[in-house]
Amino acid sequence: MVYIYSKKDTSFQKVPEEVNAGWEVWQKNNCQTCHQLYGLGGYMGPDLTNMSSDPHKGPKYMRVFIKYGTNKMPDFHLNDTEVNQVLAFLKWVDQSGQNRVKAESVHWTGTYIIQ
């Protein structure tokens, strides 16, 4: 079980099982190789830090990509439970912070434009 430190009330809070399981699926499939969280990770796919709350994308949009893959993203053949766990993990990430990279600084390929 994973615990996180809360600055708000200076305590440790237990991460929900589904979130922890989603993190394990994320790790097992090396998602960080292509995707970023908080601007850290690979550059082939988009940063997923705040994708869950994106009004134009969100969980329904993400579910399709996670479940079936795309031309660039492989189909990892995850079952529905694993897909839900990854979505729970990404929702938790979304609620825990923000990607510091401005949207206009991200090239369509997913790489950052540094000026």
Image (tube, helix red, strand yellow):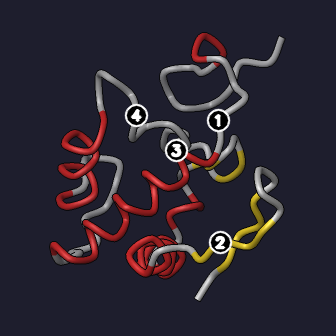
Give the amino acid at mark 4.
Ser
| Left or right: 92 as drawn, with respect to 102 | left
Disc with the residue nearer the chain's start (2 vs 4): 2
CB atoms at circles 2 and 3 under 8 Å apart? no
Position of 78 compared to 21: left or right?
left
Under mark 2, the amino acid is Gln
**Label 3 environment density (alpha carbons within 10 Å; few <14, some 14–19, many ≥20):** many
> What residue appears at the point 58 percent right and 17 percent down from the top-left corner?
103
Query: Circle 2 — which element?
Result: strand
Q: Amino acid at mark 1?
A: Gln
Q: CA distance from mark 1 to mark 3?
A: 7 Å
What residue is shown with label 2? 13
Q: CA distance from mark 2 to mark 3?
A: 17 Å
Label 3 residue SS = helix
Spatial separation of the CA atoms under disc 4 and disc 3: 7 Å
**Of pointers 2 and 3, the one earlier in the residue sequence:** 2
Task: Describe the element under mark 4 as helix, strand or loop.
Answer: loop
Earlier in the chain: of badge 1 and badge 2, it is 2
Give neighbour class at mark 1: few <14, some 14-19, many 20+ (Cα, 10 Å). Answer: some
How many marks the image carries: the answer is 4
| Disc 3 residue type (three-letter) | Asp
Q: Is residue 115 left or right of residue 46?
A: right
- The residue pinned by badge 3 equals 94
Circles 4 and 3: CB atoms closer than 8 Å: yes
Numbered badge on residue 98: 1
